Amino acid sequence: MSVVRKSIAVCLLAVLVGYLANSGLFRPIDVEIVSKDRMAIAFRRERGAFQNIPVKYEEAYKTLSGILSEDDLNIGVSFYFDDPSKVQQDNLRWTIGYVMSNPTEDLERTVASMGFDIIHLPLSEAARTIFPFRTQFSPMIGAMRCE
């Protein structure tokens, strides 16, 4: 292998490792128990491979931009209902959504008209994980690391 090919290979490897690092692959996942007031979550039910999560988050973000605040759009929520080792990828059930910090009836009606379901969660304790959402692969990396 020539010096030029080796240099190109090293550069490509460095770019790949840098991209994965920026996506959160090497970042610690913080998990904490928090007490939350009643909250509302705008979400969509999805079915399919977990690889589709970044695309669906991006679609939801674009749909809800200008309707929800930027703070709300920084708090993504996912629920995973199936074990990927026991269920075929095409049949995996999951949701993606965003927390609505100050929901009003008008806001909920607007969000619901865009194909989102609204769920109200009562005051409770919950496990919260903090993971960066920097690239479209970040949610997938976070979900795989939390298995």
Image (cartoon, rainbow, N blue to C red):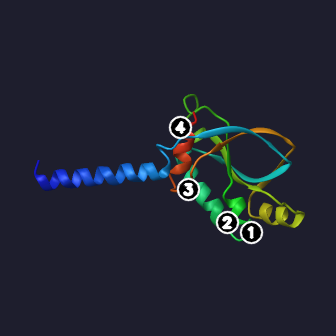
Q: Position of residue 11 (x, y in %)?
A: 26, 54
Q: Give the residue drawn at x 65%, y 48%.
A: 46
Name of the residue lying farthest toward the right: 105
Q: Give the residue drawn at x 58%, y 50%.
A: 53
> In 3D space, how far apart are the residues under numbered discs 2 and 4 (Cα atoms)?
28 Å
C-beta proximity under 8 Å, tags 4 and 3? no
Q: Nearer the viewer, residue 132 or 84?
A: 132
Tell me which label, 3 or 1, sits earlier in the chain. 3
Q: Nearer the viewer, residue 12 or 43?
A: 12
Q: Position of residue 12 (x, y in %)?
A: 29, 53
- Which amino acid is tagged 1? Ile
- Which amino acid is tagged 3? Val
> In 3D space, how far apart are the residues under numbered discs 1 and 2 (Cα atoms)?
8 Å
> In 3D space, how far apart are the residues under numbered discs 3 and 1 (Cα atoms)?
20 Å
> In 3D space, how far apart are the residues under numbered discs 3 and 2 (Cα atoms)?
12 Å
Where does label 1 land, which residue? 67
- In this view, the mark in front (3 or 1): 1
Where does label 3 land, which residue? 55
> In 3D space, how far apart are the residues under numbered discs 1 and 4 (Cα atoms)?
31 Å
Tell me, yes or no, if residue 147 can be seen here: yes
In the image, taking residue 109 as reference, residue 47 lies left or right, namely left
Q: Position of residue 120 (x, y in %)?
A: 85, 49
Numbered label attached to residue 145: 4
Tell me which label, 2 or 4, sits earlier in the chain. 2
Dividing the picture into quadrants, the one containing residue 129 is top right
In the image, taking residue 87 as reference, residue 5 lies left or right, namely left
C-beta proximity under 8 Å, tags 3 and 2? no
- Badge 4 marks a residue whose secondary structure is helix
- Badge 1 marks a residue whose secondary structure is loop
